[in-house]
Image (cartoon, grey):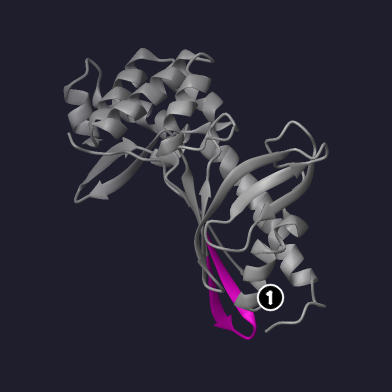
C-alpha cells in the first residue's frame, strides 16, 4: 500500500516567434509587461509585477497603495535556457514563507528564430492541506475526496 | 464545473464505495464487483459516471481494464491554476511577439 497519488503537474508547451534570449528576458525582466493585472494576492490593485533577474531574486507585486506582497523567489537562474521559481502561494491565495510549489520554464531554440516554451507547475500535492481546510467545510463530497487523497498521499 | 460533477458522482453510496476502493489501489471491474453487493454491469455503470466526473481513469492491462483515481481530477485549485497559467502564458506570448523593437543579442 505504499502508493502515492499526487495531482498531475500543470504542463504547457508552445512556441513563440522570438529567440530564447528575448523570450527569457521578456519573461523575467519584462515580467510586468505581460503579467495579467487580474492575477495578484494583495488587497490593493496590482500596479507592478516584479521578478528580480537573479538567483534568489524576489518575485512579488507592488500594489496601488505602494504595499509589496511576496509571491516567491528565483530558485534557478540559467539564462536563456531555464528558469525555476518557488511559488509560495497557498490554496487560499495567501503568501506562505515555508511552503511552496515549483514553477519551471524551459526555453529551447527550435531554429528560424523560434523558441519552444515548456512550462510546468508541480508539487501541487503540497497545496493539499490548504485545499482540505478550505473546501472540506463546503461540502461533504469534497471533504471525502480530499481525505482519501491525503490518506493515499501519505500512505 | 468539474467539482460539481464530482459531488454528484459521489452522492451515491455504492459509487462512493467504488471510489473508496480505488483510493486504496487500482482495481479491475471484476475485483470491484467481488467486494461489493452489486453486479458487474452495475459496477461498470458506476465507473462510467466516476470517469465522466473526472474522478477516475482507466487503462488496459492485457485483456482487462484497470481503474484508478485520476490524480489530475482531484482539485479545483489545480483547475484554477491551469486556467490561470493559460491566461498568463498567452499574454506572455503576445508580449514577446509584439515587441519587435527590442534588439536581440
As drawn, A3 above or below A133: below
Give how far across and how far down residue B33 sits, in percent. 21, 25
The quadrant of the image that shows the N terminus of chain B is: top right
Tell me the residue at 27%/49% (across/down).
B60
Give how far across and how far down residue A65 sits, in percent. 82, 36
Q: Is residue A97 magenta?
A: no
Q: Which residue is mark 1?
A: A17
Tell me the residue at 48%/20% (across/down).
A133
The quadrant of the image that shows the C terminus of chain B is: bottom right
Dividing the picture into quadrants, the one containing residue B73 is top left
Closest to the observer: A113 or B24?
A113
Tell me the residue at 58%/56% (across/down).
A57
As drawn, B88 above or below A141: below
Residue B23 horizontal side relative to residue B50, left or right: left
Circle 1 chain: A
Residue B88 horizontal side relative to residue B20, left or right: right
Residue A8 horizontal side relative to residue A15, left or right: left
Give how far across and how far down residue A32 sits, in percent. 74, 56
Give how far across and how far down residue B31 sits, in percent. 18, 30
Give the extent of the magenta segment. A106-119
Q: In the structure shown, which secondary structural element does the residue marked by tag 1 occupy?
A: loop
Residue B9 horizontal side relative to residue A117, left or right: left
Q: How would you classify the magenta stretch by its main secondary structure?
A: strand
Closest to the observer: B39 or A61?
A61
Amino acid at each position: 500500500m505504499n502508493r502515492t497519488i499526487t495531482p498531475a503537474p500543470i504542463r504547457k508547451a508552445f512556441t513563440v516567434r522570438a529567440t530564447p534570449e528575448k523570450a527569457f528576458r521578456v519573461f523575467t525582466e519584462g515580467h510586468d509587461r505581460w503579467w495579467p493585472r487580474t492575477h495578484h494576492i494583495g488587497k490593493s490593485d496590482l500596479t507592478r509585477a516584479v521578478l528580480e533577474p537573479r538567483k534568489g531574486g524576489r518575485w512579488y507585486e507592488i500594489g496601488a497603495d505602494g504595499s509589496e506582497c511576496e509571491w516567491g523567489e528565483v530558485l534557478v537562474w540559467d539564462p536563456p535556457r531555464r528558469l525555476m521559481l518557488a511559488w509560495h502561494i497557498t490554496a487560499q491565495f495567501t503568501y506562505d514563507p515555508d511552503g511552496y510549489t515549483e514553477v519551471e520554464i524551459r526555453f529551447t531554440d527550435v531554429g528560424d528564430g523560434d523558441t519552444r516554451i515548456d512550462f510546468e507547475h508541480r508539487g501541487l500535492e503540497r497545496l493539499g492541506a490548504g485545499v482540505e481546510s478550505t473546501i472540506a467545510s463546503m461540502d461533504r463530497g469534497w471533504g471525502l475526496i480530499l481525505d482519501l487523497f491525503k490518506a493515499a498521499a501519505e500512505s | 464545473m468539474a467539482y460539481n460533477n464530482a459531488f454528484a458522482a459521489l452522492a451515491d453510496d455504492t459509487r462512493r464505495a467504488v471510489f473508496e476502493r480505488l483510493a486504496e489501489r487500482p482495481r479491475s471491474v471484476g475485483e470491484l464487483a467481488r467486494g461489493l453487493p452489486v453486479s458487474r454491469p452495475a459496477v461498470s455503470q458506476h465507473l462510467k459516471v466516476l470517469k465522466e466526473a473526472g474522478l477516475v481513469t482507466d487503462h488496459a492491462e492485457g485483456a482487462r481494464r484497470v481503474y484508478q483515481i485520476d490524480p489530475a481530477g482531484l482539485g479545483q485549485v489545480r483547475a484554477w491554476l491551469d486556467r490561470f497559467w493559460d491566461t498568463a502564458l498567452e499574454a506572455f506570448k503576445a508580449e514577446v511577439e509584439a515587441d519587435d523593437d527590442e534588439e536581440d543579442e
